[in-house]
Amino acid sequence: YRPAAPSRRAVEHYLAERDTRLGWPSPSRFGTRHFDESGSRRIPAFPEPGEACVSLYGDSFSYGSGVSDEAAVSNQLSLLFGCRVANYGVHGYGSDQALLRYESMEDDDAPVVVLTHLSENVVRNLNRYRRLIASGDPFSMKPRFILDEDTGLRLVPLLETRTPDDYLEVLRDPGARLEDEYFLPGGPSGVQRLRFPFSLRMLLSLRHYHVRAELRGMPFYAEFFEPDHPSQAVELTVRIFERFVSAASERGQRPLVQVLPTAQSLAEYRRSGRWVYAPLLVQARKRGLDVVDLGRSFAAETARGGPCEIYLGCEFHLNERGNALFALETARAIEERGLRPRSGGRARSAVSPGSAAGARPESSGHSL
């Protein structure tokens, strides 16, 4: 961990603009190129914010980072169903923030709501400051849930920092204020701070969960799916699923929960024949949750060419073909459960016939 040192002016701007419940995105970004006035990604097929037949919640894979608005999963689902599919996915979200964003969207009355859990988000659900698990933005404080014997889940809210000095002090020493953060330097995750004696710190860094995974030839998040892992990440994530399903049902909406594999999960499945997130599915189904595993269709679609077929750069976000597959399999899951929404008007033409964004994956074998 290397503390970031943003300017005081940048911190002041962040404190004034941040979402005090979710962390990010700032509401000031709504009505811009990235989000429409409702907070959804722009949907070219149904560009006017308003009544939606389906709403999507998740991270940047749900948002469709790396592809155009036309090619994103939400626009393709809108074209498949003939009604607006709102997209409330946000870059960097775990399942926890996705759930909280759903709960904060009190005006979202879509008949069907979908929560998509990316396999690596089992790590994000344990985290309160994203820079402890990923490089980048120093303004990435977030809430998280912890397991509670009485209520099942207890929310640890976004850390309250009122002044720039207060915020900068947390960056310098996260351990002083960020209780319930699994990835604090010197903790069980193996994250370290580079400080004297350096040789000892380098030796201790061999305990880092990324290093442990690399030595085993596994995705960096694989160990967190182990049923006896001290973080209890699987149990926590299942509880988040349960809360989403319960909240949607109380609002009279039909929930759908999905697990989407990263390219690393898919590569490990091709190597070993086992999904690293299988324990999550087992535990969820023991609790009576109907969780859709998108891995099967992703594996079938990439049986010949591997992850490069559907992931940008072979390992990052979904490409246009991957978003098309994501949309088709989500639509299939909705159809199979009798949740197909009614058409809500005529779609504005968003893609030309036969384009990559509008085409359905040829090998999927599914039709709507």
Image: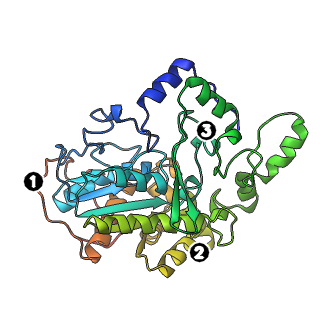
Amino acid type of disc 1? Arg
Residue where numbered disc 2 is placed = 273
Amino acid type of disc 3? Ser
Q: Nearer the viewer, residue 100 or 224?
A: 100
* Circle 1 residues within 10 Å: few <14, some 14–19, many ≥20: few
Disc 2 and disc 1: Cα gap in Å?
A: 43 Å
Q: Quadrant of the N terminus?
A: top right
Disc 3 and disc 1: Cα gap in Å?
A: 43 Å
Q: Secondary structure at mark 3?
A: loop
Which mark's residue is nearer the viewer, 3 or 2?
A: 3
Q: Nearer the viewer, residue 290 or 47?
A: 290
Residue where numbered disc 1 is placed = 346
Left or right for 170, reference 333: right
Disc 3 and disc 2: Cα gap in Å?
A: 31 Å
Amino acid type of disc 2? Gly
Q: How is the image coloured?
A: rainbow
| Residue at x-position 56% and y-position 19% | 8
Q: Quadrant of the C terminus?
A: bottom left
What is the quadrant of residue 99 in the picture?
Answer: bottom left
Q: In terms of sequence position, does the residue under pointer 2 or pointer 1 come before the other?
A: 2
Residue where numbered disc 3 is placed = 135
Q: In the rendering, at what x and y percent does residue 267 appear? A: 57, 63
Q: In the rendering, at what x and y percent does residue 203 appear? A: 87, 47
| Residue at x-position 90% and y-position 39% | 199
Q: In terms of sequence position, does the residue under pointer 3 or pointer 1 come before the other?
A: 3
Asked if the residues shown at circle 3 and circle 2 are in contact, with their CB atoms under 8 angstroms apart, the answer is no
Q: Secondary structure at mark 2?
A: loop
Give the vertical position of 65 relative to 216 (above or below): above
Residue 251 in view (yes/no): yes
Q: In the rendering, at what x and y percent does residue 14 appear? A: 47, 28
Left or right for 140, reference 16: right
